[in-house]
Amino acid sequence: MENQAARKPFKPLPYLLILPTAIFVAVFTVWPVLLSVYQGFFRQRMNIAKFREPSWIGLGNYIDLFQDPYFIKVIGNTLKYIIGTVPISIILGFLFALLVNRKVRGVGFFRLAFFHPMVLPMVSAATIWLFFFTPDYGLFNTALRFLGYTGPENWTGNPNLALLSVIIVAIWKNSGYYMIFYLAGLQNLPGEVFEAAALDGANDWQILWKITFPLMRRTTLFISTVAFIDAFRTIDHIFVLTTGGPSRASTVLLFELWSQRFEYQDIGVSAAITVIFVVILLAFTITNFLVSERKEA
Amino acid sequence: MSVSMPKKARLRKQLGSWLGSAFTTGLALLWSVPVIWALVASFRPANDAISRGDVWFGSSFTVENYVRAWSLAPFGQYYINTIFVVVIILAVQLITIILAGFAFANYQFLGKKWVFFFVLLQMMIPTSALLAPNFATIRQLGIFDTRLAIAIPYFGSAFGTFLMRQAFLEVPRDLVDAGIMDGCSWWQLIVHVYLPPSVPTLIAFGLSSATWHWNEFLWPLIITNSDKSRPLTAGLVRFTQLGEIGAQWSLLTAATLMVIAPLFIVFLVFQRRFIQSFLHSGLK
């Protein structure tokens, strides 16, 4: 059988069918990675006359980046942003799913309430939140004052709060998205396990922590992956809320990449950051893949 | 005693469920405040200054904010651009993902695994990470500041290809063989055998693709330079930065809602489908 299959004449059709997709992947995914690796070895700045022509500097761009306290700060901000958004959105997503996974009236409205931010453009969401963060009359500040908050109110303009304001908007927007994965997971749980646990006299908390949560481990792992990549690639709200400031207090990696390329016109440095970015993403995806493969085995 | 215990337990359960509902309602309202406020404020007269404690309903109901926002920036053109981009991306994607998904599901060929891996690279490296080199490519192609430039990087979709392959693999092999016996050519196989049962997957992919590209901001921002190609999202951000707008919140919310409205209304109507499609689209 196998020999027969191997001797089949070469048929070009499958390759031709994949060709359109493969061309777009080659031009807009593979080529840009290769181009960035190459350009990362050169000094080239478009807005400085003597650096307009690329000159080879080896690892110079990378060395400069990692010796630049600003870039270290950007890496720190990125980590803070990920730590600030990912776990909280996931916990909220799980909470929302538990709340809407009951047979009560109004469950359709609850689902809509938690999920709808996902459908909005991030820039629209951020524009609305810009108002909420306004000092004095902004609703976010009004609510906080009501709860006894007396700190600074200019959220997007305060170096200590700017990153936090960006994090808050991301949490508001994404939690409902993660909710639907948990909801799907919850609805696929075997009902008998819960009935048995209830018969054994387990209370609701015990069921939640000892049964539901462990059964959701795969879902959680999956959502963490989605959330992690989302955190890396979405910076739209930063443009609206803080434009990365004040003094880069809310600049994360992708925003830094954008400003190096389009504000400072620095081809070499932006290429180097692209490479760093791609390496992080690939390392993450591959680790993830290996971890989940091992679990399967 | 033996009678009162279950009664007590039932009462507690009732109270618990009541508290749960109250908590959920509170949280749901809290989560909806931003959009509800925007909707209310957009109908507030522009000269009703917003101040502490007075941010909701104004002295009267007016649509003047929408009229003014529409006249201050070419939102009509932005609409056309966004719709053009969303439709062209989806149209091309449907062709490329159906063809590629079919090839991966229906044929055995040399290097299939490697070709599949090559296509999946697109899912591992989000396009937004590659905006700098892709900007250079667009410049090279001579299509900077066109709607085509916004759309073209998305014409091939690894994710869509993956979804279609999964859907096509579900089609029973017997059905395919019967089609071949009947003398179906490859494209007849797609149209008559593979596509009919895969329509839900197509719709799911279509909804998430349309949502994604309606909302996209960063790539259109850097690849457009004029109103003739600028989509709604980039137009809105430009609008908020116009000098004459300042902190006129009722005007800003009106513009924001204009950007949101069409997609949001479709979402409200087809809510279940949408949520289903997002569930699908997360399976990457």
Image: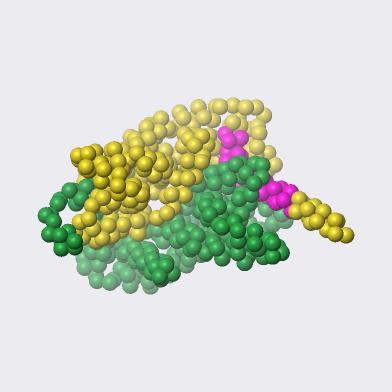
* Residue under the image location 47 percent in, 45 percent down: B276
Q: Nearer the viewer, residue B217 or B85?
A: B85
Identified at 33% across, 72% down, the residue is: A63
Instruction: Provide residue B128's location: percent of width, then percent of height.
Output: 36, 54
Q: Can residue A211 be seen by looking at this rendering? A: yes
x, y (%) of residue A30? Answer: 26, 58
- What is the drawing colour of chain A? green
Name above or below for residue A59 compared with residue A191: below
The chain letter of the yellow chain reads B
In screen coordinates, is B158 left or right of A182? left
Residue drawn at 65 percent across, 37 percent down: B56
Name the quarter where the C terminus of chain B is drawn.
bottom left
| Residue range of the region highlighted in magenta in the rendering | B16-42
Residue sitting nearer the eye, B195 or A123: B195
Quadrant containing the N terminus of chain B is: bottom right
Question: In the current view of this chain or complex, which residue is farthest to the right?
Answer: B1
> Does the magenta portion include A49?
no
- Where does the image place residue A284, in percent across and percent down from the top left? 39, 66
